[in-house]
Amino acid sequence: MAKVLIVYVTTTGNTEKMANAIADGAKGAGADVTLKTVGEASVSELGGYDVIAFGSPAMGAEVIEEAEMEPFFSDAAGSLSGKKVAVFGSYDWGDGEWLRTWEDRCKEAGAVIVAEGCKAHLEPDDDAIAECKAFGAKLA
């Protein structure tokens, strides 16, 4: 059974809804899932998980949330070599460039991307929730 850690930051609740749906999908596929906000997580615990999913809304000029997730991810990058990683989040504009950039940063850190980034436009609708659950199943 895969041990999956989902670490996310949310500003409006949309990314949190996604994180919960991803957790449901991973649990449904048999994974042991831990769900934490970035403020509850520590970089030192990443080694205890088989798969790590990072979640953040798109901010500013299509970047991850800068106050909490950016410093956490920057610190975590040194621990990602060989780790299975995926990214997700919600956005209001653009086309998901922030997720592609984030995936590239994961790859540069030596991570193995296990599922293409999962995104939802604003509040996830039923289709987006279904996509999140399928994304979670891939993490398992």
Image: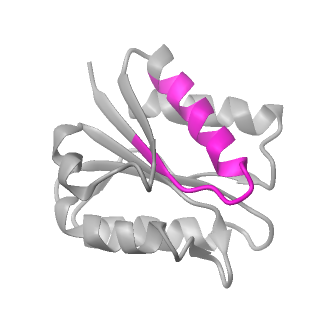
- The location of residue 69, given as percent across then percent down, is 46, 66
Would you say 6 lies left or right of 83 here? right
Quadrant (top left/top right/bottom left/bottom right) for the C terminus: top left
Residue 30, above or below 21: above
Q: Is residue 46 visible?
A: yes
Per the picture, the main secondary structure of the magenta-coloured stretch is: helix
Quadrant (top left/top right/bottom left/bottom right) for the N terminus: top left
- The location of residue 22, given as percent across then percent down, is 55, 34
- Residue pictured at 36% horizontal, 67% vertical: 73
- Residue pictured at 51% horizontal, 29% vertical: 23
Return the residue nearer the eye: 140 or 67: 67
Magenta stretch, residue numbers: 6-26
- The location of residue 32, given as percent across then percent down, is 34, 22
Displayed quadrant of residue 130: top right
Q: Is residue 13 magenta?
A: yes
Would you say 116 lies left or right of 71 here? right
Return the residue nearer the eye: 74 or 99: 74
Residue furthest to the bottom in view is: 61
Identify the colour scheme used: one colour
